[in-house]
Each structure stands twice: as C-alpha cells, then as structure tokens.
Image: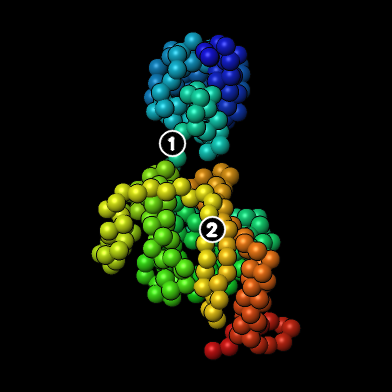
Amino acid sequence: MTLADADNRLGDYLKDRRARLDPASFGLPLKRRRTPGLRREEVAQRAHVSATWYTWLEQGRGGAPSADVLDRIAGALMLTQIEREHLFVLGLGRPPEVRYQASDGVSPRLQKVLDALELNPAIVKTATWDVVAWNKAAAAVLTDYSKLPPDKRNILRIIFGDPNTRARQSSWEDVARYVVGAFRADATRYGASDRAKALVAELRAQSPEFAAMWRENDVRRSGEGTKQLRLPRGGMVGLEFSSFAVDGRPDLGLVVYSPATPQDAEKIRKLVGEKNKQKDSSFRGGPKGRVRTP
C-alpha cells in the first residue's frame, strides 16, 4: 500500500502537527505568516533534511522515509512518545524501536490497581527485573520489598543471593533458569542490554550457578506459568502467574499471581492478615498520628 493509497495519512499528520507549533517559542518571526504553525522549510531545517524532500513527504510523493529521518522529524515537531510512535506506524507500518527508560516507580493509578488485588500477589518490574511496585499480597507471599534497599529489589539478585528465597522454591533450578532466560530476552527486547551489563557481571562473579546458566544463552518468554512456594510456617501454596506490558511503558512488566485453588486463596488471605497485624503492632500512638516503635 502506497502513501497515496492511504489517503496520505502521513502527510496529513505532519501538516497537522506542524500547524500546532508556536513559531515564537522557537524564536522565529511572526510577521508575514499566512497560516499557523511552522513553515515546511523551518521544520526541514530543524530535522536536517532537504526542504524540497520534506515538502514532497507532506504531499505524499517523497517515498518511504527511513527510521532515522522519522526520528529527526519527530524531534523537530516536538512530538510526544505516543505521537512519535504514531508517526512511525504511518510512515513505516511499525512502531519505533523501544528506547529504554529507567523507572523509579509507577503512577498512583497503577498502584491503586495493584492494591485492589487483595489475594493476588502482584509486582511491576523493569526490563532489568528491578521491582518498582508491589502490593500487600506480594509482600506477604513473595518478598517484602519494602525491607530491601531500592538497589537490592532485583529479582535476579534475590533468586541467586537470598538463601531464604532459594529454600522456598519447590524447584529452585527450574525457577532460576526461567528467570535468567526471561531476563535476557527482556533486556534485549527493550533496549536495556547495556544497562544490564553491570548486573550480569556482578552476578557472574558472585554466583557460579548464574555464570553457568548465563553461558547457555537461553531465552524464555515471560508470559504465563505456575509455581509452588513453601510457606514460612510449613506447607505449600500454588500460584498461577500472568505477565502484562504496561500501556505506554512496554519496558515495564506487570506480573499477577493468582491462587491455584480456593485452599491456596485461603492460605494467602491468612498470610496477608498476619502481615497486616505485624505492621499494625509496629505502630503506636493516638488519633493524631502513628509513631513507629524502635
């Protein structure tokens, strides 16, 4: 399908975005402008492309642009991330390559979604498998991430470095292989390979088992699965998990665990209740506020 066949949607979109820009904000003169926004040659100059070629592109006869040119045009038009993605879909028929974004947390709305899952342990992790958000059920059943420094809230560090977490897995080696393979795939898919190098080097030096699994170059899909966890006071709990991308931030992954049976749900309910009691007992004070005890 040519640009003409598509009713020149790319050209129409470029003209619309161009018309929305304020010339004054770019230090450009306002006199002798017949139409709102920037002129074509001004956008072309900002994007470092030929004014003639850019004009043809808006007219639907410039041919298919390269990803590099579209990226420069997106910058010249001051497009947002979602606008840039739409530009690539119109121009190339696909979204742009993912740019990795370091994240320190999630939006309040997403945290509310996590908190609403009372019996479903849920976490949000980055492309390098740092946990940046969790709910009460995750703290009770998986790991209480609030007790860890932010730089230690990494699933690989926990799996390979925490003996208690290792002992709770029904099959630690299977879990570890899955984590390594899925981590490798995520870091590559979301452009975080360079950022992951330091973590990989650290784990290879500290864990011979990680080093051996990393050398296998295995990749896994972090989609759905099941797992069995040993409870702190004995017994097992069965969990089914599903992974989802966060809209607008595909490098963030939402992982939701569901109790495998009604009996497992009751075990989780009990664990969450005990966790809440422990939290409440660590505070004292009147209605003016709670003070954490030493």
Residue nearest the observer in this picture, 61 or 141: 141
Provide residue 70's location: percent of width, then percent of height. Answer: 45, 26
Asked if residue 202 lies left or right of residue 258, the reply is: left
Total marks in image: 2
- Looking at the image, which residue is at 38% across and 47% down? 219
- Looking at the image, which residue is at 52% across and 13% down? 2
Kindly identify which numbered label has been placed on residue 149: none
**Secondary structure category for the residue under label 2:** strand
Residue where numbered disc 2 is placed: 226
Residue kind at label 2, given as amino acid type: Thr
- Looking at the image, which residue is at 64% across and 86% down? 281
Kindly tell me whether residue 187 is visible in this rendering.
no
Provide residue 30's location: percent of width, then percent of height. Answer: 56, 25
Q: Give the quadrant of residue 83.
A: top right
For the residues labelled 1 and 2, the Cα–Cα distance comes to 31 Å
**Secondary structure category for the residue under label 1:** loop
Which badge, 1 or 2, comes first in the chain's sequence? 1
Residue where numbered disc 1 is placed: 97
